[in-house]
Amino acid sequence: QVQLVESGGGLVQPGGSLRLSCAASGRISGPVAMNWYRRIPGKERELVAGISSVGRTTYADSVKGRFTISRDNDKNTVYLQMISLKSEDTAVYYCNLQIWGSHYWGQGTQVTVSS
């Protein structure tokens, strides 16, 4: 069983920065991809950023150049560094772990960008 715990969300002003963390626990072996999704109010959940088992990263067009995903395999933790935040980034952000076709999700952390 895999458990994911997110942290780092909160209220930030436009143009500000936040760093989200997601710590995974349990038996984790094999090729692991870790991702950040978000659900913006009134919209479907979308992939924000992902990092593969070999470190390849991908980003949604809306966040390219502003968000950076990284991982610490020894700590089983994935991060999302967010800068130049906009009001449209306001959402619940979810950590996702994929391994051997199985998906695991965190509970989500609220990010609110507002003056």
Image: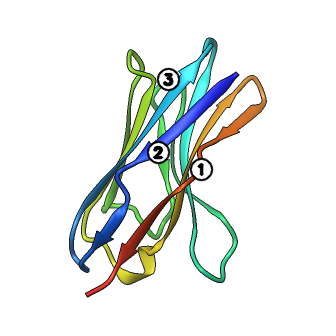
Q: Nearer the viewer, mark 3 or mark 1?
A: 1
Relative to 38, 42 lies left or right: right
Q: Residues within 10 Å of mark 1 (few under 14, many from 20)?
A: few
Relative vertical location of residue 10 with respect to residue 73 in this rendering, above or below:
below
Tell me residue 74's x, y (percent): 38, 15
Determine the secondary structure under disc 3: loop
Q: Earlier in the sequence, mark 1 or mark 2?
A: 2
Q: Residue 86's quadrant in the figure?
A: bottom left
Q: How is the image coloured?
A: rainbow
Relative vertical location of residue 81 with respect to residue 41 in this rendering, above or below:
above
The kind of residue tagged 1 is: Gln
Tell me residue 48's x, y (percent): 52, 58
Relative vertical location of residue 33 with respect to residue 28 in this rendering, above or below:
below
Q: Nearer the viewer, mark 3 or mark 2?
A: 2
The kind of residue tagged 3 is: Val
Q: Residue 54's mark?
A: 3
Picture residue at 45% right of the left edge, 29% below the top: 55
The quadrant the N terminus occupies is: top right
Q: Residue 4's quadrant in the figure?
A: top right
Q: Are marks 1 and 2 in contact (CB under 8 Å)?
A: yes
Residue that mark 2 sits on: 6
Picture residue at 46% right of the left edge, 70% below the top: 62
Q: Earlier in the sequence, mark 3 or mark 1?
A: 3
Q: Residue 22's quadrant in the figure?
A: top left
Determine the secondary structure under disc 1: loop
Picture residue at 75% right of the left edge, 23% below the top: 100
Q: Residue 73's mark?
A: none
> Rounded to the nearest whole Å, what is the CA distance between mark 1 and mark 2?
7 Å
Tell me residue 73's x, y (percent): 42, 20
Q: Are marks 3 and 2 in contact (CB under 8 Å)?
A: no
Q: Residues within 10 Å of mark 2 (few under 14, many from 20)?
A: many
Residue that mark 1 sits on: 107
